[in-house]
Each structure stands twice: as C-alpha cells, then as structure tokens.
Amino acid sequence: MATVKLLSDDELSAEARAVFDDIRKTRNSDFVNNFWRALAHDPKTLRRTWESIKEVMAPGALDPKVKEMLYVAVSVAHGCSYCIHSHTASARAKGMTDAEYQEMLAIVGMAAETNRLVTALGVPVDEAFLVDAPAGRSQEP
C-alpha cells in the first residue's frame, strides 16, 4: 500500500510533467509506472532519480538485458518486491528467458548463502584475490 498518493497526469506540477514527458519519450511509451507517480510529489528527487537511471541503464559496456538482470538480483537481495517485478518485466522485454531467470535466481540464492557463511566464519580475503596481488598468482577462486 502506497504511503503517498500516486499522482495522475492531471495532478502533476509543471516540473514533474516535464520529467514524465521525458520518460515517455525516452521509453517510447505512454506508460509511466507507479514509482514515478509516487516520486512526482518531489519534482527535484523525481528528476535526479530519472536522470541517474537513464544514465546507468543506458547501453554501455554491459548489455541492457544484463543490466536489468543485475537490477533484479540486487532487488531480490534488498527485498524490493516492486523493483523485482518491474525489472523482471523489463528484462523479459529485453529477451531474458525463463532459463536465464531461474539461473540468475539460483546464483542470487547461492551468493546470499555463501555471503552469510563467509561473514559468520570471518574468512579473510585471499591475497591472490586482491587487486595488487603478487605477480604470477591466479585471481580465479
């Protein structure tokens, strides 16, 4: 349940409307999701967040599908149901298969388990894994 009213297009300030216009143009869609509608109460945060997401999620060294899958993985780790659903839909729209989704979830689960174990055991980082490891030492786990 939302803690703020989700603003309709008719309720937007001029500043928020400009961001919504850019969202629609950038995504080539009339749909503006509830996240943006909640943020529209604070046009400054809305704009800053939208600009950051546009930059981070834009094509780059990582494929857009991979970026969406990473977003899902982090959202699972943080327990954000909204982001899990929205970025899973986006990853699927970018070509993520059911097999890729299941494999990603298996990795997220395995990482969560081993992270807890290594933390509880206080395992020190191997010297070979450090950026400035002595020459000739493998950095493969």
Image (cartoon, grey):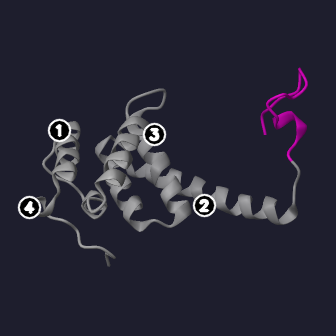
Nearer the observer, disc 1 or disc 4? Answer: 4
Residue 85, percent from left and from top:
36, 61
Please, what is the three-letter code of the amino acid marked with disc 2?
A: Gly
Please, what is the three-letter code of the amino acid marked with disc 1?
A: Lys
Q: Earlier in the sequence, mark 2 or mark 3?
A: 3
Please, what is the three-letter code of the amino acid marked with disc 3?
A: Val
Instruction: Judge the density around disc 4: few (<14), some (14-19), many (≥20) Cα neighbours within 10 Å.
Output: few
Q: Earlier in the sequence, mark 2 or mark 4?
A: 4
**Which residue is under mark 3?**
66
Q: Earlier in the sequence, mark 1 or mark 4?
A: 4
- Which quadrant would the C terminus be assigned to in this image? top right
CA gap, disc 1 and disc 4 = 18 Å
Q: Residue at x 31, y 59 (%)?
A: 42
Q: Residue 27 is drawn in which quadrant?
A: top left
Q: Secondary structure at mark 1?
A: helix
CA gap, disc 2 and disc 4 = 43 Å
Nearer the observer, disc 1 or disc 3? Answer: 1
Q: Tell which of 46 and 110 is nearer to you.
A: 46
Residue 36, percent from left and from top:
28, 57
